[in-house]
Image (cartoon, rainbow, N blue to C red):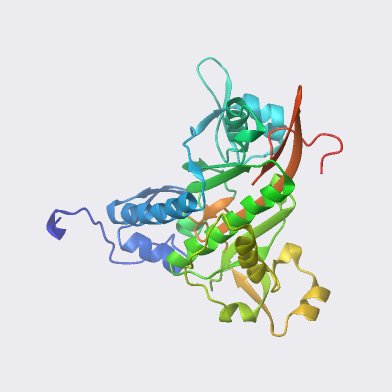
Amino acid sequence: MRLSQYFLPILRDDPKEAEIVSHKLMLRAGMIRQESAGSYSWLPIGFRVLKKIEQIVREEQDRAGAIEVLMPTIQSADLWKKSGRYEAYGKEMLRIKDRHDRDMLYGPTNEEQITDIFRQGVQSYKDLPRNLYHIQWKFRDEVRPRFGVMRGREFLMKDAYSFDVSREAGQHSYNKMFVSYLRTFARMGLKAVPMRAETGPIGGKDSHEFLVLADTGESEVHFDRDFYDMDWSAFEIDYDDVAAVAKVVEDFTSKYAATEEKHDVAEFKKRVRFAEGLTLQHRRVLSANDTGCEGLRFACGWLRFRYCHNEDADRRVTVAMLWHTLEPAAKGTK
């Protein structure tokens, strides 16, 4: 299309509300337009960029064996009440009622929904393992949305949820997503350091945030400078090779890297030859919008691993999810 026929509303000056360079440039280049606090319209050129990033994420998820689904943005509150998270989630959740006075919500995440879908569709442990993901718009009512699409209220996010027959299989699913994130960021020319992080309200055994260092940051992180010498280029790997996938994860987790919440001063001094503490901005992958993907956000990704048992009548099925399960872990569950 000719530029004369294109819609590209560029700005001459920096908008007053823009604080950081990326926000200023995206507004001035006509990529986005702010509609309300933390909510943006993606204009033609910005939307093309967003779709290209989404496609990279999709290709890497597919390559890792994940299967794409699409769940609704508006969810029934019933499942959330059953899981105990309806009240616990806090003011970030947008709660609404439909015309029949039923409690509904604009999904901030989809653990409850995907677990309900899967448990109704699975017939046997032979149906495992499976990894389901979707890319969908989310809404979280941030107290102080800022930095443009890096910390907004409405954002595009990729969630992945894995179901496995054992703890070991669940760990392999986690490792595959770990490698998939490395490849995703590498394809976009980004060095996202996988750092040990708190599991937060999602809970779980393992948690990593893939963080891209930025001068406009707010949080302090601690990592080994040897990360700079690692090969971050997109590499080929056979995701069915358990040992090879685990080796990549080991290579990237053997060096010290932790968020402030997980930082251990004694371990840091013992393991790190060149200690370095930096400030960074948590950016979300595919988020036109923090702290983690949960999944991929721009440019930060989160991985969580939780293991639980689910007993169903005359059969026992062990389910390990990438995030967390719908029902609280039963007594004796690890």
Quadrant showing the N terminus: bottom left
User: Which residue is painted at 75% across and 63% down in the image?
Assistant: 262
- Between 239 and 25, the one lying in front of the other is 239
**Left or right: 171 as drawn, with respect to 142:** right
Task: Answer yes or no: is residue 210 visible.
Answer: yes
**What x and y, as percent, mark residue 266?**
83, 75
Determine the residue positioned at 58% across, 55% down: 176
Q: Residue furthest right?
A: 332
Q: Residue at x 54, y 45 (%)?
A: 159
Residue 127 picture quarter: top right
173 relative to 90, above or below:
below
Q: Where is residue 104? Give x, y as percent.
A: 56, 26
Q: Nearer the viewer, residue 109 or 281?
A: 109
In depth, the one of 208 and 161 nearer the eye is: 161
* Residue ID at (77%, 76%): 268
Looking at the image, residue 317 sits to the left or right of residue 181; the answer is right
299 is higher (above) or lower (below) than 115? below
Q: Considering only vertical position in the picture, is 119 above or below 63?
A: above
- Measured as percent of width and height from the top left, residue 170 is found at 68, 48
Task: Report x, y in % for residue 310.
Answer: 74, 32
Q: Residue furthest top?
A: 100
**Taking 41 as reference, is 311 left or right?**
right
Question: Which quarter of the figure is the C terminus placed in?
Answer: top right
Instruction: Examine the rendering and report whether any part of residue 290 can be seen.
Output: no
Nearer to the camera, 212 or 174: 174
The number of callouts visible is: 0
